Amino acid sequence: MFDSIPTLFVLASLLALISGRALVSALFIALGIVAKVFPALYLLPQALHPRNKSLRDVVLYTAIAVSASLLLWLSLSVKCLDSALRHQLGFHLQRLDKGLSLMPNIQYSTALSLAVSTAILTAIAVQMRSEEKAYR
């Protein structure tokens, strides 16, 4: 249930990008990133979409999406930031290994599958860009 909301934003972002509305697409992907982190995997492939014709368009798309997601996240978390940081820091300091990383609890296959899917989507976007330039 909770993955359906960010997925909706990713799909809306793709639809807006295909329709030629890059700004709306960047804002939708930002909403998806604020809802859950996994839509960030789609940011680079969407930024490299052939509709973003120049490097300036790619950088602008990425900057809009990242800044909008950070602003939304900060505005939503300012109220509870102090208590969230206190509880999070307390959680990490009470762990047996006293580490500040959750990385040992993440399976390598999970991290690998996220990296591979992002690499594949990016390769597809780069290929689409090169085909688009070849037709010009």
Image: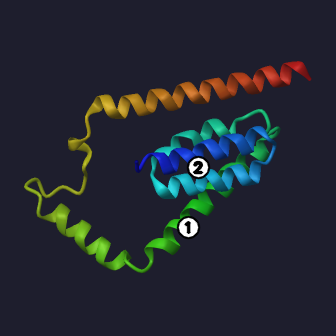
Seen as rendered, the residue at the extreme left is 96
| Residue under the point 79% across and 20% down | 131
Q: Is residue 101 left or right of residue 41?
A: left
- 104 or 71: which is nearer to us? 71
Q: Quadrant of residue 103?
A: top left
Which mark is in front, 1 or 2? 2
Seen as rendered, the residue at the extreme right is 136
Residue 46 position, x and y percent, is 66, 39
Q: Quadrant of residue 128?
A: top right
Q: Identify the element where label 1 is drawn.
A: helix
The residue identified by callout 2 is 9
| Residue under the point 18% across and 55% down | 99
Q: Identify the element where label 2 is drawn.
A: helix
Q: Coloured how?
A: rainbow
- 4 or 103: which is nearer to us? 4
**Badge number at residue 57:** none
Identified by mark 2, the residue type is Phe
| Residue under the point 67% across and 40% down | 14
Location of residue 74 with respect to 3 vertically, above or below:
below
Location of residue 124 with respect to 93 vertically, above or below:
above
- 75 or 133: which is nearer to us? 75
Residue 100 position, x and y percent, is 23, 57
Question: Earlier along the polypeptide chain: callout 1 or callout 2?
Answer: 2
The residue identified by callout 1 is 72
How many marks the image carries: the answer is 2
Dot 1 crowding, Cα within 10 Å, few <14, some 14–19, many 20+: some
Q: Is residue 27 left or right of residue 8?
A: right
Where, quadrant-wise, is the C terminus in this rendering?
top right
Q: Is residue 104 left or right of residue 25?
A: left
Residue 93 position, x and y percent, is 15, 64
Identified by mark 1, the residue type is Leu
